[in-house]
Image (tube, rainbow, N blue to C red):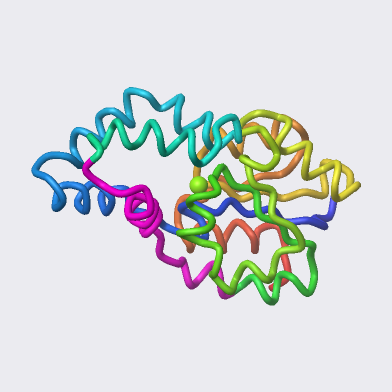
Amino acid sequence: MPVSAIIFDLGNVLLPFDYSIVIEKLNEKSSGLGFRYAEKYKQNYNVHRDYEKGLMTDSDFLDVIMEWTENKVERETFCKYFSRIFSVNERIASILPELSKNYRLFLLSNTSNIHRIYGWNDYSFLQNFEKLFLSYQVGANKPEKEIYQAVTNYTKLPYGEHLFIDDVKEYADAAKKLGWDAINFLSEQQCIDELKKRNIKF
Ligand SMILES: [Mg+2]
């Protein structure tokens, strides 16, 4: 079936990120604080998942974070540290304008309002997308089927006309299970090769 819609993941596909930046920033504030925060974050990963699913408000999330950072950092400052972890994959971003001439483009991301506002909202490549599907707005996280179905419900296209690109294999596999095609993004070149293999025009 020919591809009509290409759906991109954000983190580590279009935006490589590095969580060690926030850890370093917190360590600069107070010795070892970043490491203690990272340990709490890992041990309570459900908080991260709940926040990205829209089950917690920004304020709820920051209440927890203030505890984890031992009240040594202002909320606003934490939001900046937490979100200045992104850089742009220019090679992948650069093919979006051409792709958008031939395909409907969408973004499908597990993300949060803080990351959006303080982190990635101003990147100009976002203009190539017809619509952004963001976990905290949809109320579901990848790999939950509801988030993929939110896209399909919107496009009104057959499942087989969707091509998804995600660096997390589990998330790519979940899309395949629903009938989408999917590329498990491993590197820029591998992604470009996989697109060419499918005769995607760009
Ligand atoms: Mg990702």
Residue 106 is left or right of residue 135, and the answer is right
What secondary structure prevails in the magenta region? helix
Q: Quadrant of residue 3?
A: bottom right
Residue positioned 70% across, 57% down in the render: 198
What's drawn in magenta, residue-wise? Answer: 72-94
> Is residue 188 or residue 63 the one in the foreground?
63
Look at the image and say whether residue 149 sits in the magenta stretch. Answer: no
Question: Disc count in the image?
Answer: 0
Decide: is 49 above or below 24. Answer: above
Q: In the rendering, at what x and y percent does residue 52 appear?
A: 54, 37
Q: Quadrant of the C terminus?
A: bottom right
Residue positioned 46% across, 50% down in the render: 186
Decide: is 53 above or below 26. Answer: above
Q: In the rendering, at what x and y percent does residue 8 appear?
A: 63, 54
> Is residue 129 or residue 192 the one in the foreground?
129
Residue positioned 88% across, 44% down in the render: 158
Q: Quadrant of residue 144?
A: top right
Q: In the rendering, at what x and y percent does residue 72 appear?
A: 21, 43
